[in-house]
Amino acid sequence: MKKTAGIIFRSLILLLVGIAIGLYISDNNFAGRTLGFSIGNHDKVSKALTLIKNNYVDSVNEDSLEGITVNDLLQNLDPHSLYLQPQRAQSINESLDGSFTGVGLEYQLLRDTLVITQVYPGGPAANAGLIAGDRVINVDKKKFSGTKLTADRVNKVFRGDTDAVISLAVLAPNSKNIRSFSIKRGHVDLSSLDAAYMAAPGVGYIKISKFALTTDVDFRAALAKLKKQGLKKLVLDIRDNGGGYLNAATALADEFLKKDKLIVYTKGVHDERKDYFATDSGEFKDGKLAVLIDEYSASASEILAGALQDLDRAVIVGRRSFGKGLVQQQFPFGDGSAVNLTVARYYTPSGRSIQKSYKEGVDSYHNEISERMRKGELFSAQSNFDDSIFKRPSPYRTLNGRKVFSGGGIMPDIFVPADTAENSPLIGELGDQQLFTAYVIDKLQPTLNKFPSADSFIKDYEVNNNEFDNYILYASKTIKEMDSHELRMSEPAIKTLIKAFAARFKWGDNAYFEALNSDDVTLKKAIAAIE
């Protein structure tokens, strides 16, 4: 699914891989050939694979074929039961476990040169002294820049065994002097918290990107910091948060709910009902709370939003969430691959399942967000209730008696339409081509050095018309044709994104979101709702 350009900000990270889903095609032309075994009612899949291995006309990759077959089987169950290739399984687990082994940097390939765009605090690259803007020229005394670099090749260089040493020759920003670094691969922390700052007097803002093992710890640390700055009320942003661990969602919900309140329960045919209750250990059980969601808030995000809505603990602001009410468990294989199998459904405190229908198949299921856009739901509150899902009488009520719905995600209490300018095809293409970060690297680094801090940059820097024109001229070298009407419509959003990407390049994610949110209507409505 395609995310809005406002959150497509990360460069190629050193753990990117994809899920390849293939098709299993049968043919009965050789039905008379002796199989060498008798096919009974069980174990047909493994026997079919043995048949192919021993009799197929060409050689086949057994591991790949097994993966395709298993995934095809799983996808006939539901859209979230998946076979994961070893690298994909490792990537997911590292992301949710809160750490990985590597050097700890993000990069962009610009004119066949690896340019560092972010350095993770406390990681090997940061400890060695690498900074954003450094260009990697040689690796292990061999030419690296200008050698037709790809993401896969970069991955192989920077990921690997713990404690292995990589030798880098690096050209510093705005310098002709090459510096040498020896970096030992090691432990790199991954925070699930993207930003935490004071959005208004007394109102804190915390954005969480996923529900990982470290989410509750990250949240508590951020909350304590903001309380020292005067936080009394909180806006929690889980837009574009696709979920993660169920226990991480319940732990975060526990921060806001009174003791013994039911957070969620799960059950399945082979999984007895399990209830999750709040304890007395939360750090924000009384202050006013708003939660931001959108159509990409899914799974664990919906567990949290559903509990806080059902118990009337928070005002939910934004657009209807994705609608994933299934719980997966990962079953690993010996080669590092794994199956994510749906084992239960979850239910909010009022008893509702928010899982949307998948009876029309996987493709239709994943295209449902596009269908919402086509019907106008993302731009009109009324169109939400034109859907038959929300026309039906609902037996579900919040603690205070408000009607809520099942079968299609979490409906917000306050609807905020999508910004058509921010979601324009032009901005999507600019983001896909990584032209915001590229422009910062090529043109804005001297400007950034004039500001002593992120606060001063966010307060005093604005992208004027001349800077905007320079950016469009720069981008036009890559995107040859731009619609003039779309360009005019998208100008304010593009200016905001230039500033936000510049802030991130110099000062990190917190500065990025603070700059990005300066004109965010959803955040403004959330603040107004709790003030």
Image: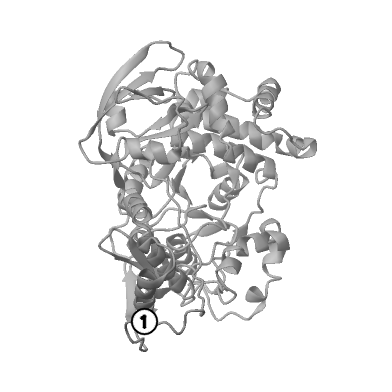
Q: In this view, does 432 lie above or below 254?
A: above
State whether residue 81 is above or below residue 208.
Answer: below
Task: State the residue in front, 280 or 156.
Answer: 156
Specify whether residue 263 is in view.
no
The quadrant in which residue 158 appears is top left
Q: Position of residue 203 (x, y in %)?
A: 48, 43
Q: Is mark 1 on a helix, strand or loop?
A: loop
| Residue at x 38% of width, y 60% of height | 61
Mark 1 belongs to which amino acid?
Leu
Q: What residue is shown at x 39% (from left), y 26% (from top)?
A: 144
Farthest right residue? 485
Q: Is residue 382 above or below residue 30?
A: above
Give residue 449's position: percent from left, percent from top.
48, 17
Residue bearing mark 1: 35
Q: Residue at x 45, y 85 (%)?
A: 32
Q: Which residue lies furthest to the bottom in this view?
A: 41
Of residues 182 and 489, the one drawn nearer to the viewer in this rendering: 182
Q: In this view, does 240 lie to the left or right of 463?
A: left
Residue 190: give x, y in percent of width and height.
Answer: 34, 44
Residue with the most extreme top position? 176
104 or 511, nearer to the observer: 104
Number of numbered discs on residues: 1
**x and y percentages locating residue 30 in the rendered image:** 47, 79
Q: How crowded is mark 1: few (under 14 residues within 10 Å), some or many (20 or more)?
A: some
Q: What residue appears at the point 59 percent right and 49 percent down from the top-left corner?
A: 522
4 in relation to 135, above or below: below
